[in-house]
Amino acid sequence: MEKEKQLRAVITVVGVDQVGIIARITGKLADCGINIVDISQTIMGDLFTMTMIVEMGDAEKSFVQIRDELVAMGQEMGMEIHAQREDVFRYMHRI
């Protein structure tokens, strides 16, 4: 498989706060060889939100495989996890 150089993605996580959210998600990313470039998380009442920008150039799997695994992880945790290529995210959210 050819590595996707300079590929960056935006990952968002939303759901009810629980123990281990950050550890579980960042552990998964580390296991896949993904570097977290920026991360922001907030808890409002019992609602947890997190946004990350990640670099996937050294990832051992394709973007689609990782995205699907994160979505499945979110379902297991009762949370919404979305991953989108940074260029697509920026295009969709431009003003």
Image (spheres, rainbow, N blue to C red):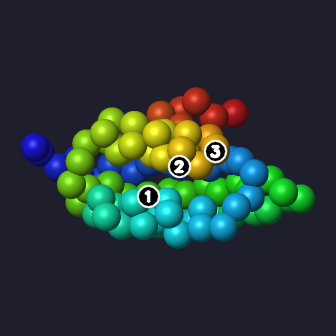
Q: Which quarter of the rendering shows the N terminus?
A: top left
Q: Which mark is residue 54?
A: 1
Q: Amino acid at mark 1?
A: Val
Q: Which residue is mark 2?
A: 11
Which one is earlier in the sequence, the residue at label 2 or at label 3? Answer: 2
- In percent of the image, x 47 and y 34: which residue is there? 88
Rendered residue at 26%/56% (across/down): 59
The extreme top residue here reads 92
Residue 11 appears in the rendering:
yes
Label ID, residue 79: 3
Say what secondary structure mark 3 lies in: loop
Q: Position of residue 33 (x, y in %)?
A: 28, 63
Q: Report whether 9 appears left or right of 38.
A: left
Q: Please, what is the three-letter code of the amino acid marked with disc 3?
A: Met
Q: Secondary structure at mark 1?
A: strand
Quadrant (top left, top right, bottom left, bottom right) of the C terminus? top right
Q: Are marks 1 and 2 in contact (CB under 8 Å)?
A: yes
Which label lies toward us, 1 or 3? 3
- Image disc number at residue 95: none
Left/right placement of residue 87 relative to residue 61 reads right
Among the two numbered marks 1 and 3 on one chain, the one whose residue lies closer to the N terminus: 1
| Disc 2 residue type (three-letter) | Ile
Q: Nearer the viewer, residue 89 or 60?
A: 60
Pinpoint residue 85: horizontal percent, then vertical percent.
Answer: 43, 40
